[in-house]
Image (cartoon, rainbow, N blue to C red):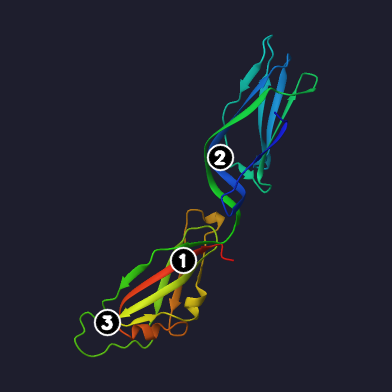
Amino acid sequence: PDMDTKIPLSSIQEVNITSARFKQGELNFRGQSSVAEDLTVTITLPDVRKDGQPLEFVLPLDYQGNSPIEVTTPFTNLADYVIDNSNGELNIQYEALNASNQSRELDLVVGMARDWVFYNVEGNWSEQRFALEVDTVNIDLYDDIVEGDLYFSNPKLNIIINNSFGISAKINIKNMSVLTVDGDILQLTGPAVDAGFNLAAPANADQGESEQSIFTLNRDNSNIDEIFNAKPEKIWYEVEVVLAPG
């Protein structure tokens, strides 16, 4: 095996992962040598660090007259180690030295990883769009009115969204239609509908939390007054979520 090996770390499609911090997980290495002398093998992962120090494994290969010699390290707990994936690869280096500090090459160096879970993953996301299913809201304001009119002088509709994604996001209204009691169909329009809603997002320090955003549709940014005064019976809407907009 090469003493300096680079393993490509593929990212998710459209996502370039630059770093990740371990919540749990373990790693160990096994080394094998046919060299007829004692060796001290140091395996280093310079791209996996904790408190600024790279992850290292030491394998003492003691020659006792028979070869090959094989040693396996105990599993190392990776909690709070950080992988730097800015180059898109994981660098693994080993150095095998004899008692005179002369370098030797091993027959085999292999690692085993298990139970990897991450606190967080950082990187560059390209824009992703997710269409949500069409949903419906029934309005029963006019169910019990026998005669007379109901007029809204300044109606408002609050849209409340809780976002737990740790990246920027946006809601676009692709369509919002209203069925009136008279059987007419109206479209919700206006600058607020055209612009969509940018969502607040939790920071890395707020992992596991949500950020709430409240948006108000009123007569100044939409035709919501026309909608409500046309006696709406049902609203159906279709929205999309945009992650990393732009």
Separation (CA) of disc 1 from disc 3: 28 Å
Circle 2: residue type: Ala
Location of mark 1 (residue): 240
Circle 1: residue type: Glu
Mark 2 and mark 3 lie on one chain; the one further toward the N terminus is 2
Mark 1 and mark 2 residues within 8 Å of each other at the beta carbon:
no
- Give the residue drawn at x 68%, y 42%: 52
Binning the other alpha carbons within 10 Å of mark 1 as few (below 14), some (14 to 19) or many (20 upward) gives some
In the picture, the quarter occupied by the N terminus is top right
- Give the residue drawn at x 47%, y 58%: 164
Looking at the rendered image, the disc whose residue lies closer to the viewer, 2 or 3, is 3
Residue 196, position as x, y percentages in the image:
50, 73
Looking at the rendered image, the disc whose residue lies closer to the viewer, 1 or 2, is 1
| Label of residue 129 in the image | none
Location of mark 3 (residue): 181
| Residue 34 occupies quadrant | top right
Separation (CA) of disc 2 from disc 3: 60 Å
- Give the residue drawn at x 80%, y 19%: 100
In the picture, the quarter occupied by the C terminus is bottom right
Binning the other alpha carbons within 10 Å of mark 2 as few (below 14), some (14 to 19) or many (20 upward) gives some
Mark 1 and mark 3 lie on one chain; the one further toward the N terminus is 3
Residue 40, position as x, y percentages in the image:
71, 22
Location of mark 2 (residue): 79
Left or right of 71, for residue 234:
left
Mark 1 and mark 2 lie on one chain; the one further toward the N terminus is 2
